[in-house]
């Protein structure tokens, strides 16, 4: 059983706007590809043909086709007196990537604070026969104290840099 692609309907002014945006030199190539997908879908091309034309997979074609159709439909259903005029900014917003969460933080704010406080103590108090901390020594001390299980020297450096703390 095959699925049918979402139909995209653009009036002449919307199509002209998309073509104008597509021809701008300031628009990134990935955005031009998405515009090309929408324009090709509007003239009735199939996803596999659009994928060949745009040099991408069928999955991204379906994704941007569906995302455009949903945003455009929501925009059309909004009261004409309230909806914004379709312009370049709105079109690029519809075709932009969605916000993502990112990687979960492995080191809590409390652990960061403890590492920054540790850096203010002298290394001699923590069993290191030196007068100044290095990032590697701070890593060892933080693990020995049980502040963290593992941490890199670079992460310790970023913590100290963000807190504007100079190790003693």
Image (spheres, rainbow, N blue to C red):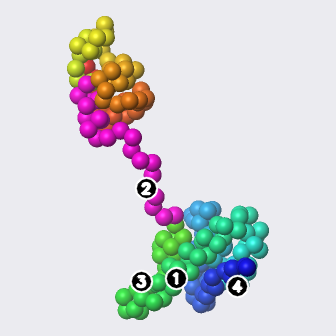
**Structural distance between the alpha carbons of marks 1 and 4:** 16 Å
Circle 2 residue: 101
Q: Residue at x 47, y 84 (%)?
A: 74
Q: Earlier in the sequence, mark 1 or mark 2?
A: 1
Q: Position of residue 6 (x, y in %)?
A: 63, 82
**Quadrant of the rendering where the C terminus is positioned:** top left
Classify mark 2: residues with Cα within 10 Å, few (<14), some (14-19) or many (20+).
few
Of the two numbered discs 4 and 3 in the rendering, the one whose residue sits closer to the viewer? 4
Q: Secondary structure at mark 4?
A: loop
Q: Earlier in the sequence, mark 2 or mark 4?
A: 4
- Seen in the image, is 123 located left or right of residue 84? left
Q: Residue at x 52, y 82 (%)?
A: 72
Circle 4 residue: 43
- Seen in the image, is 67 located left or right of residue 117? right
Circle 1 residue: 72
**Above/below status of 102 relative to 151:** below
Circle 3 residue: 84
């Amino acid at each position: 059983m095959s699925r049918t692609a979402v139909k995209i309907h653009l009036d002449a002014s919307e199509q002209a706007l998309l073509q104008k945006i597509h021809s701008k030199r300031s628009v990134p190539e990935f955005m031009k590809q998405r515009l090309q997908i929408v324009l090709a879908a509007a003239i009735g091309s199939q996803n596999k043909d659009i994928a060949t034309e745009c040099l991408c997979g069928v999955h991204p074609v379906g994704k941007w086709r569906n995302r455009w159709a949903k945003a455009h439909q929501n925009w059309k259903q909004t009261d004409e007196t309230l909806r914004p005029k379709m312009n370049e900014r709105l079109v690029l917003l519809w075709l932009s990537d969605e916000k993502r969460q990112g990687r979960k933080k492995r080191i809590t704010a409390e652990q960061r604070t403890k590492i920054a406080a540790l850096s203010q103590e002298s290394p001699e108090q923590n069993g290191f026969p030196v007068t100044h901390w290095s990032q590697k020594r701070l890593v060892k001390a933080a693990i020995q104290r049980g502040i963290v299980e593992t941490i890199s020297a670079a992460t310790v450096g970023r913590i100290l840099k963000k807190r504007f703390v100079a190790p003693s």
